[in-house]
Amino acid sequence: MTTAESASESSHTGEFDLGALLSERGAERYELHGRYLNHQLPRMLHTIGFDKVYERADGAYFYDADGNDYLDMLAGFGVMGLGRHHPVVRKALHDVLDLNLADLTRFDCQPLPGLLAEKLLAHSPHLDRVFFGNSGTEAVEGALKFARYVTGRPRVLYCAHAFHGLTTGSLSVNGESGFRDGFAPLLPDTAVPLGDLDALERELKKGDVAALIVEPIQGKGVHEAPPGYLRAAQELLHRHKALLIADEVQTGLGRTGDFYAYQHEEGVEPDLVCVAKALSGGYVPVGATIGKDWIFRKVYSSMDRVLVHSASFGANAQAMAAGLAVLSVMENEQIVASVRATGELLRSRLVALKEKYELLADVRGRGLMIGIEFGRPRSLKLRGRWTMLQAARKGLFAQMVVVPLLQRHRILTQVSGDHMEVIKLIPPLIIGEREVDRFVEAFTAVMDDAHDGGGLMWDFGKTLVKQAVANR
């Protein structure tokens, strides 16, 4: 360290102590959020008993002040692919900060973006170039812009129940009305059912479609594209001079047991692929729009258009370092193969429970993206209670399962979407047999209670019904 650096560091010492600030005011977390941020979030968390105070996290676990561990089967909606605070990613971020790089000058070409693009493209053999942004929705926005520009067409098709993001362009291809309501007008768009090739072809024949954007496995409800659909859709799109965009923001980077979920189907080569979430290592937001060379060359067709699509924080050194570290860990620790094995173990053990529990309607998914769906029971007693919940609000039974998993068994899960009786499991990709055992045992205990016909679970259901009715 030079004398100037030493003097500079000394002059700043003591000006800001993050640890002291958290120690002094961390207990105000729910009050602060209610006062200054989204006031409905703490209200919701208090209502369902999710207002926990987690002191620290490591790998696939959270810990409270008493040292109790909580198994994370949510992974921050898929962001924490490698779990929390993976040592390799942590070291990479310490290293990049200590290097004092001349980052984001805007008028040079730093090496880290090129190195990360090279690594990503090694897993995407039919693609050629990468644009780095800051999130999944931004990656989708880039893909929508690129597709509309290179085709000269305005309309983008999407699948019913799709997500894709919440910024205006991404919202235009969001298949859930609850997110779209009140934000019109949006971009020209049309929804088609996932798997319906006839509906896709009808829209393509109108001649104004730039692209179809599709999640190979939808996050909302965990619905997989039918076998052969992506390949056939790709052929239809190309015949009509439109593009296939694969949204792999949640499914990409090993989540489904292949690097990308579209790779489960032979011959599928999307024109544009969107990734984010797990690429961040859980630390620095990063998203990527990956595409074919001709698309990028047409968008960036001259020096006058060099900044026609850009992002102020895109390709920053911290994000690039995190992404490089994540891909290194995935390769060195053989994460994709591990996900395939662990996912099959978890799914098979859950499928085996279907014969035991009449409320358990389906178990589906790939790798470590699994949907557990509940349905109308056969027995009269359970059917009456199920009907009561459905009349108040669809999705309440799934919430009744999620709550005791956390409260009694210290396992964090989520209901897969609004008005859905589906729990989605998207744990960190690093979990193994121990975590599978813990989840299945806890889930079995909760289902035993639900089928018993009494107890705390149905009492909580009455509370949810009252809350649902009050919010109408």
Image: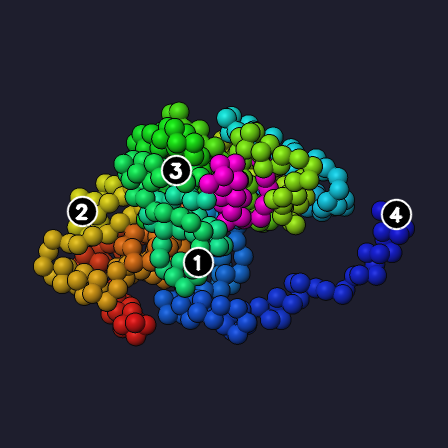
Q: Nearer the viewer, mark 2 or mark 4?
A: 4
Q: Residue at x 52, y 68 (%)?
A: 37
Label 4: few (<14), some (14–19) or many (≥20) C-alpha neighbours in 10 Å: few
Visible residue check, residue 422: yes
Q: Residue tagged by mark 2?
A: 356
Q: Position of residue 260 (x, y in %)?
A: 45, 34
Mark 4 vs mark 3: in front: 3
- Of the 4 image quadrants, the one containing the C terminus is bottom left
**In the image: residue 377, left or right of residue 132:** left
Q: Decide which of 170, 411 is in the foreground and name it.
A: 170
The residue that appears at 77% across and 64% down in the rendered structure is 14
Instruction: Give the residue pinned by disc 3.
Output: 207
Q: Characterize the magenta stretch by its predominant secondary structure.
A: helix
Residue 329 visible in the current orientation = no
Q: Which mark sits nearer the N-terminus, 4 or 3?
A: 4
First-in-chain label (2 vs 4): 4
Residue 221 vs 241, above or below: the answer is below
Q: Which residue is mark 4?
A: 2
Q: Is residue 137 magenta?
A: yes
Residues marked 4 and 3 touching at CB (< 8 Å): no
**Is residue 205 inside the magenta stretch?**
no
The quadrant holding residue 320 is: top right
Three-letter code, disc 3: Gly
Q: Is residue 149 left or right of residue 453?
A: right
Residue 185 is labelled as 1
Asked whether the beta carbons under mark 3 and mark 1 sit within 8 Å of each other, the answer is no
Element on which disc 3 rests? loop
**What separation in Å lies between label 4 and label 3 (alpha carbons)?**
65 Å
